[in-house]
Image: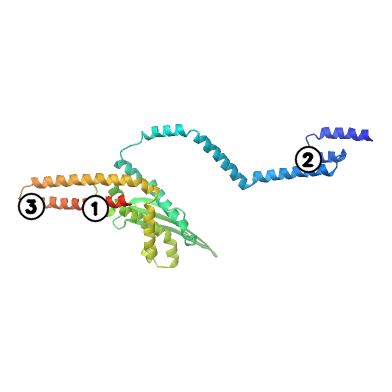
């Protein structure tokens, strides 16, 4: 009997060398290895495999692995910091040193103000109660600098409403526009539009972003279109403007604006000097021409005073 059993075991064991753990367990039982110690070991092995599987598929463990991978990359990068600093210095030598009008105009492009408007809007939207934003989108569309004789800035609403039985579908898009005069005054040496200076641009941006933040609140509250300039709106403008001056985007552009205003001051001073010289050369009888020159000189002096005040205020920011 033992010979038969051994022969059977050898055949079965050879056939099942690569079988799963269940078959091996049967072979243990058949060959007389059935005891509590072996069963306990098998149970422990199964529990270990289960723990390993859970660990590998656990979200927290996955995050830890990602962090470990990032740490490895950080260590590799830090090993090259010396070389990086040398390359960085070489690269910065190629940067344009002059902060001229051409460079400033690039910042008055579409993308710069789109990013600025939405980063400020998002910052305050996260702080206000989310319930007051039932319809407004997460992103404001910047429509650019547009011609207008009435407004410094404005927000337009594109609202889609639909009702099916007792269900409502309302979708809204907010578009923010700025007056083209802001761009002209901030990038053109020859322009003299003092009421559209950079300081006023910051106030206008704050004003329009405040409209966007409170649009749903006032519409639902039922102020019949009179919500535009209520107390909540005015207070929010001041808070937004203070924050706006501290943003990285504005910190980036302010030095260029300061240099531009200084350049503009020199341009206006030179213009005044030329006007005064032209006035001196006019004959005494040319009363009308002399009067026109004198008016232009006064306008330039007044504008010069505005520029100097603006420069000091921006520096204080």
Q: Residue placed farthest to the left in the image? A: 285
Residue at 34%, 56% (x, y): give it.
204
Query: Do the numbered discs 1 and 3 sit on residues whose CB atoms are within 8 Å?
Result: no
Residue occupied by mark 2: 21
Dot 3 crowding, Cα within 10 Å, few <14, some 14–19, many 20+: few
The residue lying toward the viewer, choosing from 158 and 200, is 200
Classify mark 3: helix, strand or loop. Answer: helix
Classify mark 2: helix, strand or loop. Answer: helix
Q: Position of residue 139 (x, y in %)?
A: 45, 53
Whichever of callouts 3 and 2 sits on the residue coming sooner in the sequence is 2
Residue at 37%, 55% (x, y): give it.
242
Dot 2 crowding, Cα within 10 Å, few <14, some 14–19, many 20+: few
For the residues labelled 3 and 2, the Cα–Cα distance comes to 114 Å
Dot 1 crowding, Cα within 10 Å, few <14, some 14–19, many 20+: some
Residue occupied by mark 3: 287
User: Which mark lies nearer to you, 1 or 3?
Assistant: 1
* Image quadrant in which the N terminus is located: top right
Q: Position of residue 169 (x, y in %)?
A: 51, 60
Q: Position of residue 263 (x, y in %)?
A: 25, 44
For the residues labelled 1 and 2, the Cα–Cα distance comes to 88 Å
For the residues labelled 1 and 3, the Cα–Cα distance comes to 29 Å
Residue 306's mark?
A: 1
Query: Do the numbered discs 3 and 2 sit on residues whose CB atoms are within 8 Å?
Result: no
315 to the left or right of 18: left
Residue at 81%, 43% (x, y): give it.
39
Whichever of callouts 1 and 3 sits on the residue coming sooner in the sequence is 3
How many numbered marks, from 0 up? 3
User: Which mark lies nearer to you, 3 or 2?
Assistant: 2
Q: Is residue 147 visible?
A: no
Residue at 42%, 64% (x, y): give it.
218
Q: Colour scheme used in the picture?
A: rainbow
């Amino acid at each position: 009997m033992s010979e038969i059993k051994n022969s059977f075991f050898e055949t079965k064991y050879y056939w099942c060398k690569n079988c799963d753990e269940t078959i091996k367990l049967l072979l243990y039982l058949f060959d007389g290895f059935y005891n509590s110690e072996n069963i306990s070991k098998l149970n422990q092995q199964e529990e270990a495999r289960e723990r390993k599987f859970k660990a590998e598929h656990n979200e927290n463990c996955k995050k830890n692995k990602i962090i470990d991978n990032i740490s490895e990359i950080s260590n590799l990068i830090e090993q090259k910091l010396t070389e990086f600093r040398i390359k960085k210095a070489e690269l910065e030598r190629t940067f344009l040193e002059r902060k001229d009008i051409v460079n400033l105009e690039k910042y008055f492009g579409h993308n710069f103000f789109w990013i600025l408007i939405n980063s400020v809007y998002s910052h305050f939207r996260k702080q206000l109660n989310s319930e007051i934003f039932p319809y407004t989108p997460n992103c404001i569309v910047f429509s650019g600098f547009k011609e207008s004789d009435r407004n410094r800035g404005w927000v337009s609403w594109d609202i889609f409403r639909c009702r099916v039985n007792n269900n409502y579908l309302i979708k809204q898009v907010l578009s923010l526009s700025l007056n083209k005069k802001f761009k002209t005054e901030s990038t053109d040496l020859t322009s003299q539009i003092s009421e559209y200076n950079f300081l006023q641009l910051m106030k206008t941006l704050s004003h329009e972003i405040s409209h966007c933040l409170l649009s749903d609140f006032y519409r639902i509250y039922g102020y019949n279109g009179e919500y535009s300039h209520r107390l909540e709106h005015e207070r929010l403008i001041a808070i937004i403007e203070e924050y706006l001056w501290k943003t990285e985007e504005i910190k980036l552009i302010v030095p260029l604006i300061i240099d531009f205003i200084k350049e503009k001051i020199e341009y206006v001073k030179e213009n005044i000097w030329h006007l005064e010289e032209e006035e001196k050369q006019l004959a005494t009888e040319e009363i009308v021409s002399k009067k026109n020159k004198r008016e232009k000189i006064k306008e330039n002096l007044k504008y010069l005073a505005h520029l100097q005040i603006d420069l000091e205020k921006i520096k204080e920011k």
